Amino acid sequence: MAREVRHTATGPLKLDEDDVDPEKGDVAICRCGISEEYPFCDGSHNATTDEDEGVVYRYEDGERYVVEEIVYADE
């Protein structure tokens, strides 16, 4: 499976003790790119469990779309 991920941040994320959830006690960083609370994980990756191999997906506003064609700027 592949996924189109659009990031708006261009620098690193520095975590400190204020990032620890007082109830959960942990910090989870999003690696799928579709979290509504990015850069923190909110469990949105659960929507990707039934993705098909060889298909490129894009997630936007909680909806999943199939990317039909990828056009690169330098082509």
Image (cartoon, rainbow, N blue to C red):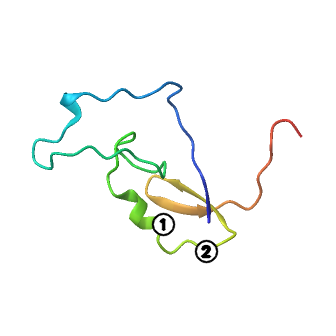
Given the image, on which type of amino acid does mark 2 rest? Asp
**Residue 9, percent from left and from top:** 50, 29
What residue sits right under mark 1 in the picture? 48
**Residue 15, percent from left and from top:** 31, 30
Distance from label 2 to label 1 (Cα)? 9 Å
**Residue 18, percent from left and from top:** 19, 29
**Residue 13, percent from left and from top:** 40, 29
- Quadrant of image for the C terminus: top right
- In this rendering, position of residue 59 left or right of residue 68: left
Helix, strand or loop at mark 1: helix
Identify the residue shown where x is 36% and y is 26%: 14
The image's mark for residue 52 is: 2
Identify the residue shown where x is 68% and y is 59%: 67
- Residue projecting furthest to the left: 23
- Quadrant in the rendering for residue 53: bottom right
Helix, strand or loop at mark 2: loop
Given the image, on which type of amino acid does mark 1 rest? Thr
Placement of 27 over or under 32, stated as above or below: above
The image's mark for residue 34 is: none
- Quadrant of image for the N terminus: bottom right
Q: Nearer the viewer, residue 60 or 3?
A: 3
Q: Are marks 2 and 1 in contact (CB under 8 Å)?
A: no
Placement of 2 over or under 8, stated as above or below: below
Q: Nearer the viewer, residue 30 or 25?
A: 25
Mark 2 surroundings: few (<14), some (14-19) or many (≥20) residues within 10 A: few
